[in-house]
Image (cartoon, rainbow, N blue to C red):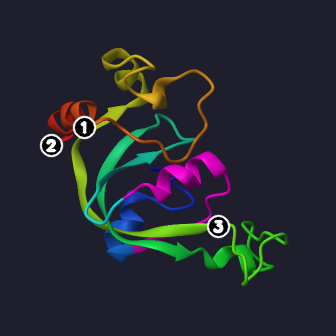
């Protein structure tokens, strides 16, 4: 799961302990999030910074939460086409697990994996949520601990 560090960082999550992962406004990313299960571990990835990369690990603790930002007119995630009767957007709640001991950059990920192994390294990928195969996740975990 990606976030820009100036919008919401791993340090902010560490301070907060838990957060709603809201504001997702891409159907494919939303659908990936809908496949998550309680207890799933999630990499926290800082994007749109120099250098981008994996900065921490979170755990999914709640599912299928209606994203409140879709109804907040002052929010940049407001969606006038969504209604309380038929909300289009939902989110999950995650909790902080740890900040990485060894930062792993996008450049390093590109050297370790091809785009079939890790969608994140695919040219043009802009999704904020992507699934990762267990084997790839285990290799990444070994590098960041």
Residue 92 appears in view? yes
Give how far across and how far down residue 37 sits, in percent: 33, 61
Q: Residue at x 74, y 80 (%)?
A: 71
Residue 6 vertical placement versus 14 (above, below)? above
Residue corresponding to mark 1: 134
The numbered disc on residue 145 is 2
The numbered disc on residue 45 is none
Quarter of the image with the C terminus is top left
Q: Secondary structure at mark 2?
A: loop
Is 33 magenta? The answer is yes
Question: Is 21 left or right of 100, judged from the image as shown?
Answer: right
Farthest-out residue, right: 80
Give how far across and how far down residue 5 sits, in percent: 50, 54
Residue corresponding to mark 3: 89
Residue 63 vertical placement versus 29 (above, below)? below
Give the Cα distance between marks 1 and 2.
Answer: 16 Å
Mark 3 Cα-neighbour bin, 10 Å: few <14, some 14–19, many ≥20? many
Q: Residue at x 48, y 56 (%)?
A: 33
Name the foreground residue: 43 vs 85.
85
Give the Cα distance between marks 3 and 2.
Answer: 33 Å
Residue 68 vertical placement versus 54 (above, below)? below
Q: Residue at x 31, y 35 (%)?
A: 133
Q: Secondary structure at mark 1?
A: helix
Asked if disc 1 and disc 2 are in contact, CB closer than 8 Å, the reply is: no
Farthest-out residue, front: 85
For the record, the magenta segment spans 19-36
Q: Secondary structure at mark 3?
A: loop
């Amino acid at each position: 799961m990606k976030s820009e560090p100036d919008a919401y960082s791993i340090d902010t999550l560490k301070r907060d302990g838990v957060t709603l992962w809201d504001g997702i406004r891409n159907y494919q990313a939303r659908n990936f999030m809908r496949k998550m299960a309680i207890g799933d571990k999630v990499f926290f990835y800082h994007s749109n910074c120099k250098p981008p990369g994996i900065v921490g690990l979170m755990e999914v603790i709640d599912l299928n939460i209606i994203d409140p930002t879709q109804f907040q007119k002052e929010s940049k995630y407001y969606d006038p086409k969504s209604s309380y009767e038929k909300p289009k957007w939902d989110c999950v709640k995650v909790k902080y697990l740890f900040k990485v001991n060894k930062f792993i950059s996008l450049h390093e990920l590109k050297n370790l994996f091809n785009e079939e192994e890790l969608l994140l390294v695919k040219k043009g990928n802009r999704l904020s949520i992507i699934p990762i195969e267990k084997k790839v996740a285990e290799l990444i975990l070994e590098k960041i601990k």
